[in-house]
Image (tube, grey):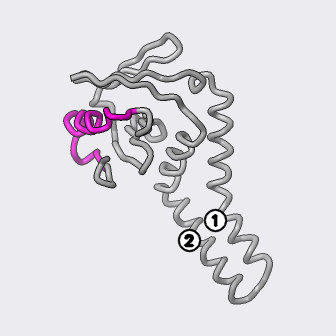
């Protein structure tokens, strides 16, 4: 079986990945929790520095990720044109800017999702982004391909998959 689809990267698609990836890191979770604590301290004591700390800890990361996503989509040539993906028994073939590369399924370390996209990690900080909008009616076939070729322990797809 082969599945082929194109992905046009946008700021919102990249931001979705960056948020998901960043908020899985312990430091991001801790910073947000400390931000909430500062918000409660502000409510109780009405000191401006508690409010400043709360706003900084809660809103800095999402705003910086949005800015970073916007800049990457705008400045990186790879994101300017659609990227073609071909999923088959050998792996995932990526075609962009006249170049083609195949990543074997054995090199995929994790698969997860958000409500908008599926991500297949090939390294600690690198992943294929498969937005549901771009896959269209091929979403179920892509999920079947992922579940067939990846170790079930590496697949962390939630929300019923679809």
x, y percentage for residue 104? 30, 25
For the residue pair 1 and 67, the one nearer the viewer reads as: 1
Inter-mark Cα distance, 2 to 1: 8 Å
x, y percentage for residue 66? 64, 47
For the residue pair 60 and 125, the one nearer the viewer reads as: 60
Tell me what residue is drawn at x 66 percent, y 39 percent.
Answer: 70
Q: Residue furthest toward the top?
A: 98
x, y percentage for residue 62? 62, 54
Image height of 140 relative to 88, above or below: below
Tell me what residue is drawn at x 44 percent, y 17 percent.
Answer: 95
For the residue pair 124 and 14, the one nearer the viewer reads as: 14
Q: Residue furthest toward the bottom?
A: 44
Task: Tell me whether the residue at label 2 lies in contact with that at label 1, contact meaning CB atoms closer than 8 angstroms.
Answer: no
Say whether residue 82 is magenta: no
Residue 91 falls in image quadrant: top left
Image height of 47 relative to 135, above or below: below
Residue annotated with mark 1: 58
User: Which stretch appears magenta?
Assistant: 135-156
Question: Which numbered marker is on residue 33?
Answer: 2
What is the chief secondary structure element of the magenta stretch? helix
How busy is the neighbourhood of tag 2: few (under 14 within 10 Å), some, or many (20 plus)? some
x, y percentage for residue 65? 62, 48
């Amino acid at each position: 079986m082969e599945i082929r689809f194109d992905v046009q990267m946008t700021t919102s698609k990249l931001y979705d990945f960056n948020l998901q990836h960043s908020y899985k890191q312990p430091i991001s979770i801790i910073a947000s929790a400390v931000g909430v604590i500062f918000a409660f301290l502000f409510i109780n004591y009405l000191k401006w520095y508690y409010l400043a700390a709360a706003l900084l800890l809660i809103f800095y990361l999402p705003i910086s990720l949005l800015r970073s996503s916007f800049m990457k989509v705008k400045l990186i040539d790879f994101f300017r044109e659609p990227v073609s993906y071909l999923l088959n028994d050998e792996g995932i073939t990526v075609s962009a800017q006249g170049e083609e590369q195949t990543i074997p399924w054995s090199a995929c370390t994790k698969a997860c999702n958000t409500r908008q996209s599926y991500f297949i990690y090939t390294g600690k900080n690198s992943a294929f982004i498969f937005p549901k909008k771009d896959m269209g009616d091929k979403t179920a076939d892509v999920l079947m391909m992922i579940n067939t070729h990846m170790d079930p322990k590496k697949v962390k797809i939630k929300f019923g998959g679809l």
